[in-house]
Amino acid sequence: MAALNIDPSIIHQLVVPGSVVAHDTTNFMSGHGTYPDATKTHLKASVAGFVHKVDRLLCVEPVENTRYLGDVGHVVIGRVLKVDQTRWIVDVQSRLDAYLPLAAVNLPGGENRRRMEDDERNMRQYLKEGDLFTAEVQQIYQDGTLQLQTRSLRYGKLGEGILVHVRSSLVKRTKNHFHSLPCGASVIRGCNGAIWICPATSSSADSNVVDTGGYVKNIESVSLDVRKTIVRLSNCIQILNRLGLPIYDTSIMQIFEMSNVYDIDELIQPKIIQTLANQLRQQTRVGSEKHDETNNGADPYAHEMREE
Amino acid sequence: MEQPEECFDPLQFAVDLDLTKSTDENTDEKVYISKSLIDRANGSSYIELASTKVTCAIYGPRETSSSSDESYSKCLLETSIKFSPFGRQKRIDPLLVQYDNDDDCEEAELCSRLEEALLPCILLHKYPKSQIDIIIDVIEDDGQHLLSAIILSATVALIDACIELYDTVVAKSLKRDQSLFTLCYMPNLAQVSCLFFDGEATPAELDVLTDEAVKQCQLLHKAICKVVISDLKAAVTSNGKII
């Protein structure tokens, strides 16, 4: 293969928009954050960030601040903005609003009934403006609009709980996004950065939450203990967001257990967050000594928190 | 008002540029650039140029409320500029509604100039059916640097919002007698995105002004790069991304 005309030092370098990333466009494809210039001889950066190279794809990745892009199969939590003719228009914190077509929800009478006119008129009885619900991304249109579906019984309208917004890149993409935590609350991690914490439902003991198909909003009184747990979890997830750590069920429980020493309202103080970060670092060091070959001595929690 | 201590003179970046021909009107115009101030906005910045102080907030790209044909293929830019009442020597009434056919509709004119300067540099075709809202607050205006401060703050805020740009637009205002000359320059593409001139001058004088403005824009560009890269480095160390 011909010598690739790229300066090896450009990889992992910080660039600003307009700086040249590669001097040879024939060997490289332009990924996100790059564009070929007018003479088609150079690849230039269009955002400020790091240069990444995967085989022949060059892209510039900004450090923070990217909107949720969406991928087929992602679980998202969205809020209804508008009720349209045969679909709902939903805000999923992305660049464009997502659509939830009437044909993609479960209707009360059975799953595969044809949609009648009555169904169109009764759309507001199921989801109206301002309602929160979970859904899965079914497809992505060419301009980036997401199309959602709530065909499974796991998805649907959400009842009582707390919504926490984190950076969407921190929500770890796993097989399961619905967790029933041992502390008595349930967590739904939306890939778009919205995380829903609610009291644990009394349904199946072994598997995970909310299999009601989301028609009924459970409004029942929640005890003070459960409320405290939920608020503590919310603060813990905010800490994970602050520290830039991946958010998944194990990491949430780890921070939750470590935070039990402090009062709930102490968890928002920067000093305590710093202490927790140090503790996490020690814990993973102990754990990584047992799995030496995977880590190569790299410390996933090695960072300093920015001073407020 | 005192300037923050981190002000730097753009001349200190002039290590590789020939400055022997700069006129002596280049008094100490200090620059202060900062970004990511406003949490709620996708991107934001604060610029001080001499004593002009301008802050910019950018929201977007987000779903556009306009249903024009244009909006289906590319992004729309909505700009809004507001003066604070204490911004100038004479108090500006914030409640005074300015109509389009008023002589004094400065805010609207600055908006259209800002759009003209920024449109060539944003990759609009990457954001169909979306709009970007640029909201500018002028805290203080010293009469000379307003337009360039506005354009600079919008550029830095666009970089902060991670909106794709062809190049950073740098603007420099020069004052000669009674005329005000503002040049918007894209250093990496070596192109002038636009030029505004209010006043009287001969073509030869305009050439001189253009050359000088280009040189100073290159200095300002280095200043912006320095700020952006040091912010990125700080963000990396606080987020723990291993390179």
Image: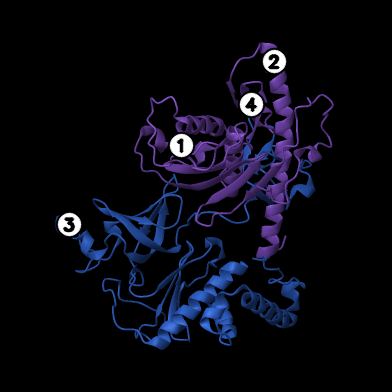
Chain colours: A blue, B purple
Q: Secondary structure at mark 4?
A: strand
Q: Position of residue A55 (x, y in %)?
A: 68, 50
Instruction: Specify whether disc 1 shares its chain with disc 3.
Output: no
- Looking at the image, is mark 1 or mark 4 nearer the viewer? 4
Q: In terms of sequence position, does the residue under pointer 1 or pointer 2 come before the other?
A: 1
Instruction: Specify whether disc 1 shares its chain with disc 2.
Output: yes
Q: Image point 58% across, 54% down: which residue?
A: B37
Separation of residues labelled 3 and 2 (CA atoms): 70 Å
Instruction: Say which residue label 4 marks.
Output: B192
Residue B83 position (above or below residue A265) = above
Separation of residues labelled 2 and 4 (CA atoms): 18 Å
Rendered image: mark on residue B205: 2
Residue A101 position (above or below residue B71) = below
Instruction: Say which residue label 1 marks.
Output: B74
Q: Quadrant of the N terminus of chain A?
A: top right
Rendered image: mark on residue A121: 3
Q: Position of residue B118 (x, y in %)?
A: 55, 34
Dot 2 amino acid type: Glu
Query: Residue A286 falls in which quadrant of the image?
Result: bottom right
